[in-house]
Amino acid sequence: MKNKSVMILGATGGVGKELKSIFQNYHNDIKIFSYNSKSLNLNSNNSNKKLYNKIKKNNPDIIINASGVFGNNKINYDKIMNINFKSNWNIINFFITNKPKKRVKIFFIGSSSYRGGRKDYMLYSASKAALNSLYASSVQFFNNSKLSIHIINPKKIDTKMIRSFKNINNAIHPKYVAKKIYKILFNL
């Protein structure tokens, strides 16, 4: 990993924070570009331009989108779709128009909710189903290219966001998800 770089979106949330820690602990030679909602607001009208500029400027070898919004049926449609789906589309769209010149790995974080949905979390489940469809289509589109795309669909993760809905029954620790992502990225 010498002279490599990783870009982590959602780097101060549960999984993003754990991923950043893993990279710092195991790869002191890797450059980390980390962004949270304050430094790169993925819900803004011009978030795609800002994201494109960050990707161009940083030229990362790995992009992990750990940003996400969980919410019940009262959540704002634009916010949940912008962060859970559109931010991932913007990453893919960047590479549709800017063919990668080097090997780049992209990692999305979905949810087990995409398979069956949840009655009180319909929009959240739909955003994760759309993300999984984007992932499957992107793998086909970028077949035989320098871009490799990965996704993980964990069950409920014990994060501050989930706890705000008082819905942490059977939730897993973010460190578990971060370690799994790390192992997938490095074929461990």
Image: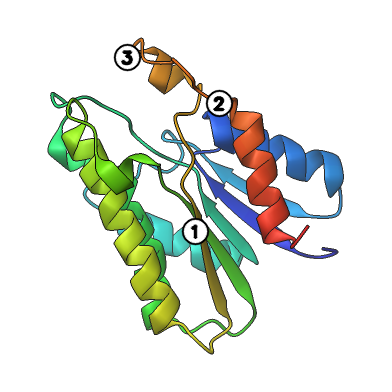
Q: CA distance from mark 1 to mark 2?
A: 31 Å
| Chain-order first, disc 3 or disc 1 | 1
Please state which of the two labelled residues, at mark 1 or mark 2, is closer to the viewer. 2
In this rendering, the answer to whether 172 lies above or below 102 is above
Q: Using residue 107 as the reference point, say whether residue 60 is left or right of it.
A: right
In this rendering, the answer to whether 97 lies above or below 26 is below
Amino acid at pointer 3: Phe
- Determine which quarter of the picture holds residue 166: top left
| Chain-order first, disc 3 or disc 2 | 3
Residue 20 percent across, percent down from the top left: 68, 39
According to the picture, the residue beneath numbered tag 2 turns out to be 172
Q: Quadrant of the N terminus?
A: bottom right
Residue 54, label in figure: 1
Crowding at label 3, few (<14), some or many (≥20) Cα neighbours within 10 Å?
Answer: few
Residue 134 percent across, percent down from the top left: 32, 65
Q: SS at mark 1?
A: helix
Q: SS at mark 2?
A: loop
Q: CA distance from mark 3 to mark 2?
A: 15 Å
Please tell me which residue is depicted at 48% across the width and 20% down the height of the picture: 170
Please state which of the two labelled residues, at mark 3 or mark 1, is closer to the viewer. 3
Please tell me which residue is depicted at 18% across the width and 25% down the height of the picture: 120
User: What's the colour scheme?
Assistant: rainbow
